[in-house]
Image (spheres, rainbow, N blue to C red):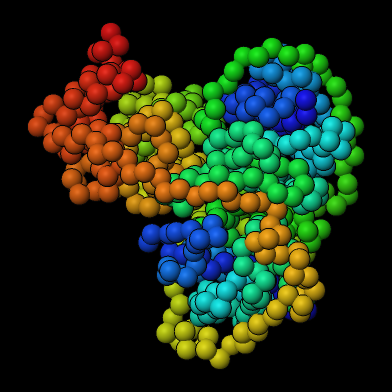
Amino acid sequence: MTMRIVVCVKYVPDATGDRYFADDLTTDREAVDGLLSELDEYAVEQALQIAEAADDAEITVLTVGPEDAKDALRKALSMGADKALHVEDDALHGTDVLGTSLVLAKAVEHTGYDLVLCGMASTDGGMGVLPAILAERLGVPQMTLLSELAVQDGVVTGRRDGDSASEELRAVLPAVVSVTDQSGEARYPSFKGIMAAKKKPLESLDLSDVGIEEDQVGLENAWTTVLEATKRPARTAGTIVNDEGEGGKQLAAYLADGRFV
Amino acid sequence: MAEVLVYVDHVDGAVRKPTLELLALARRIGEPVAVFLGAGADTAAPTLAEYGATKVLAAEVPAFDAYLVAPKVDALQAAYEAVSPAAVLVPSSAEGKEIAARLAVRTGSGLITDAVDLEAGEEGSVATQSVFAAAFTTKSLVSRGTPVITVKPNSAAPEVAPAAGAVEQLAVTVADASKGTEVVSRTPRESTGRPELTEAAIVVSGGRGLNGRENFHLIESLADSVGAAVGASRAAVDAGWYPHANQVGQTGKSVSPQLYVAVGISGAIQHRAGMQTSKTIVAVNKDAEAPIFDLVDYGVVGDLFEVVPQLTEEISARKG
């Protein structure tokens, strides 16, 4: 039987450029360059490796976001995913993590799944909780923040390196898995992969297709409200000295003045 | 006054400092009720009471250790239903955030993660967050349900505020659905004897400029001379020079100490995301153009292999 792998990915503002808030205090996704969240590439990579090791597997990449979010899907397709699913709807603007997770859960159920794969966090919101919420919403095991994983005979095993301990985990599919940036370098799309991606199916769905009402999502219905966003003032220029043999002592004196020593 | 649940982070009953900070924040918006899961509630209770817990709801079931995260959500939900709190505060560890997030779904509540401050407001608790690699500061509130807020370490000073803090047993039924992810084995991280990275008042981090694992002893010696935690940049971790558990940055730990010392670290965006909110920042780097120098209060342009040993020696000399 075909193992159905769904990789949830996010289209984010490039973290190496400047990022802004729009007038309605949502993340500005128009005045900036967007791309597939770097941390989601690790999830795509693991999906590809699992599919390569399996007898028969199909990888669907799924995103919720504006029109431009298709770029993120195409990148994942060019890496080797089989097909893409894009939930886009004007009513989605400003949806927070609880709403987005609801849409993702409905879309995952709509397309069918054995394994849902996610990155450890987005590089914009950076909450790192969506995979756990998806597991809760889907009512399946949560295998999150794995730095190593394997899928065999319908069982997923993996290692989670936590703050105080390293844990070996095991769950029976279906399950939601998230992987960290320690799980293995993501591959670059080949020229052949980029060409092939253009012919792969990319299906767009709106909210009604996945059975979501407009009043369940969007800025007005978000579970949280951003009251204000202020740019952090630039740090005042510090003192920079060139080491001419006394640099260590000078720094020690500075730290002593600040009562750190 | 409304009760506020505070999820206790502890090691065998030894309460970790971020929980004491949460108790101080909880007192700004209501009466703190501590939720203690696992063994050691009686050990922890006097400390929790000293810092303001009016009571300690305690539960200890084997499922907390046998299965990942979900059983603890069941327990926190039981506490939520017993208390009907005005807010739920959870330490912003990886696990803490997951527990909080699942509770938010179950209770139909809004979720705010990684708050760095919390104050009472007219329309509810207002949480401050530092976002986009600390380029922006936001203030937010939960607009639906009960605010569930995770708070980063070093967001407030612990305050002694003696309260009753009596231990009450919390009845917890772990659902079968919460037993999906089995913890097959657990290997505790070896203690280095140094402070916890996210909680430390001083962090000393090394990066690519160290040129190898064998040179990290320079960072460790400097850290030990000031009682600091040791951090590492992603470059140093990816090169295999230092454990990932010590990585500071977007995909590692986010730290906000009183003093951050960056050694041989250029200051790429993924690193800045994890340390930019430090109170005082100093750096040693041989490249005067390194972006880290844009952040520093004091910087030394020089060879770290000369500067750092001299710094460590001078600190030791000053301490007598």
**Residue B36 at x, y percent in the picture:** 75, 28
- Near-viewer residue (B236 or A256): A256
Position of B297 with respect to B182 (left or right) is left
Q: Residue furthest top?
A: B320
- Near-viewer residue (A86 or A140): A86
Asked if residue B255 can be seen in this view, the reply is yes
Q: Residue at x 66, y 51 (%)?
A: A224
Position of B310 with respect to B161 (left or right) is left
Q: Residue furthest front?
A: B122
- Near-viewer residue (A227 or B107): A227
**Residue B62 at x, y percent in the picture:** 82, 35
Q: Residue at x 24, y 48 (%)?
A: B290
Q: Residue at x 75, y 32 (%)?
A: B5
Residue B56 figure quarter = top right
| Depicted A243 relative to depicted A212: above or below | above
| Depicted A62 relative to depicted B130: above or below | below
Quarter occupied by the C terminus of chain A: top left
**Residue A57 at x, y percent in the picture:** 68, 77
Q: Residue at x 40, y 42 (%)?
A: B276
Asked if residue A52 can be seen in this view, the reply is no
**Residue A8 at x, y percent in the picture:** 63, 67
Q: How many marks?
A: 0
Quarter occupied by the N terminus of chain A: bottom right
Q: Residue furthest left?
A: A244
